[in-house]
Amino acid sequence: MIEMRKLYTLDRVGKIHFVDIHSAQFDTHFPQFNKSALDAKIHGLLEDGSLVTGLDVTYHAWQRVGKGWVYRPLRWPVIKWFADLGYLWFAKNRHRLSRLLTCKTRCDTCESLSLDGVKEKQQLHPTHLDEKARVDR
């Protein structure tokens, strides 16, 4: 949530659209997507229609707000392999880690807000498809 809020704050011209896969409207607007697959790791749809996942989404989202240089090293060939492996482990275990650290599978902020911090910018369209960020023009 902290990262999404920071991206939202930095995205002054609306280059990123956030979609909550846990919202009541998600299944209605996106019946073609498997919620379990989307929940397993972050997904993003680029302006050319290509689907990216994991740290590629993170890199593209931060690039859209002028901070891609921070995450660019994670996309370098040798580092990318290790970073992606680490991300996949984290994504697979994030609920367990949250439960271990907070005794809850979702934090209070996530439960109470569920992206409310970005809802005024959120507009659901059939092309928006992922849990946290859709990278757009």
Image (tube, rainbow, N blue to C red):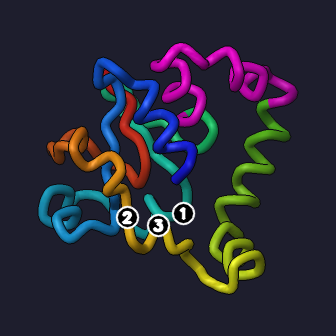
- Span of residues in magenta: 57-79
Residue identified by numbered label 1: 40
The residue type indicated by label 3 comes to: Cys
Q: Looking at the image, which is closer to me, 80 or 70?
A: 70
Q: How far, Cα to Cα, is label 3 from label 1?
A: 17 Å
Q: Residue 43's x, y, as percent?
A: 46, 46
Q: How many residues crowd around disc 2 within 10 Å: few (fewer than 14), some, or many (20 or more)?
A: few
| Mark 1 secondary-structure assignment | helix
Q: How far, Cα to Cα, is label 2 from label 1?
A: 20 Å
Q: Looking at the image, which is closer to me, 44 or 11?
A: 11
The residue type indicated by label 2 comes to: Leu
Q: Looking at the image, which is closer to me, 121 or 123?
A: 121
**Residue at 68% across, 15% down:** 69
Q: Tell me which numbered mark, 3 or 1, is placed earlier along the sequence.
A: 1
**Residue at 74% across, 72% down:** 97
Q: Which mark is residue 113?
A: 2
Which callout, 3 or 1, points to the residue nearer the camera?
3
Q: Tell me which numbered mark, 2 or 1, is placed earlier along the sequence.
A: 1
| Mark 3 secondary-structure assignment | helix
Residue identified by numbered label 3: 110
Q: Residue 28's x, y, as percent?
A: 13, 64
